[in-house]
């Protein structure tokens, strides 16, 4: 066991630079309740996006995600296996969860109503909560999503 990664330590946020628009895929003509489902985490999809779609070397993709090359290798192998399972065995595919930080966006929260919302990094800082209009808002450092 590596002393830098003892069991039980919370993992660092994996940096991502996109938010999936579509988070559920299913085979045509099969009712959803009859389908088995495979769950991909957002960091797994980001690994596929960087290496498979954008053609980055794993070293570079790992750096972008703020993780080690071996960790990147494990994440993308897991993603490939899940995608293959869905395609070959006709399963639905959902995308959610993962311990991720979207570095293209900033996350804000309302002090009163607990609404949280994202703002593009280059946009001006919001002054009011989009839900209740209250001006007492604060920036959240990172977005952690629990593993599902
Ligand atoms: Zn509010």
Image (cartoon, rainbow, N blue to C red):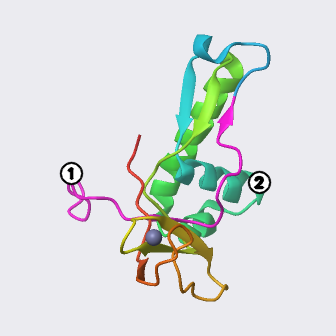
Residue 139 lies in quadrant:
bottom left
> Can residue 46 be seen at all in this image of the molecule?
yes
Q: Does dot 1 land on a helix, a strand or a loop?
A: loop
Side of 29 relative to 111 (left or right): right
Rendered view: 87 above or below 48: above
Lower position in the chain sequence, tag 2 or tag 1: 1
Instruction: Pick the residue in front: 55 or 130.
Output: 130
Residue occupying image coordinates x 45% and y 64%: 115
Residue occupying image coordinates x 33% and y 59%: 11
Tally the marks: 2
> Can residue 104 be seen at all in this image of the molecule?
no
Residue 33 lies in quadrant:
top right
Q: Main secondary structure of the magenta part?
A: loop
Q: Which residue carries the number 1 mark?
A: 7
- Give the alpha-carbon distance from disc 2 to disc 1, as whole Å: 33 Å
Rendered view: 69 above or below 129: above
Instruction: Pick the residue in front: 42 or 44.
Output: 42
Q: Does the magenta stretch include residue 3?
A: yes
Q: In which quarter of the image is ligand 1?
A: bottom left
Q: Which residue carries the number 2 mark?
A: 53
Q: Quadrant of the C terminus?
A: top left
Q: Is mark 2 within 8 Å of ligand 1?
A: no
Q: Give the extent of the magenta segment.
A: 1-25
Residue occupying image coordinates x 77% and y 60%: 54
């Amino acid at each position: 066991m590596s002393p830098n990664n003892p069991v039980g330590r919370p993992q660092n946020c994996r940096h991502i630079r996109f938010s999936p628009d579509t988070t559920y895929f299913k085979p045509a003509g099969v009712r959803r309740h009859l389908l088995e489902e495979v769950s991909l985490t957002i960091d797994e999809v980001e690994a596929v996006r960087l290496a498979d779609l954008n053609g980055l070397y794993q070293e570079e993709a790992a750096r972008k995600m703020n993780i080690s090359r071996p960790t990147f290798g494990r994440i993308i192998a897991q993603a490939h296996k899940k995608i293959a399972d869905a395609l070959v065995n006709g399963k639905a595919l959902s995308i959610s969860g993962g311990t991720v930080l979207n570095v293209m966006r900033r996350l804000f929260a309302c002090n009163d109503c607990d609404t949280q919302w994202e703002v593009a990094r280059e946009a001006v800082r919001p002054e009011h909560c989009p839900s209740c209009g209250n001006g007492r808002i604060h920036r959240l450092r990172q977005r952690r999503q629990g593993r599902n």
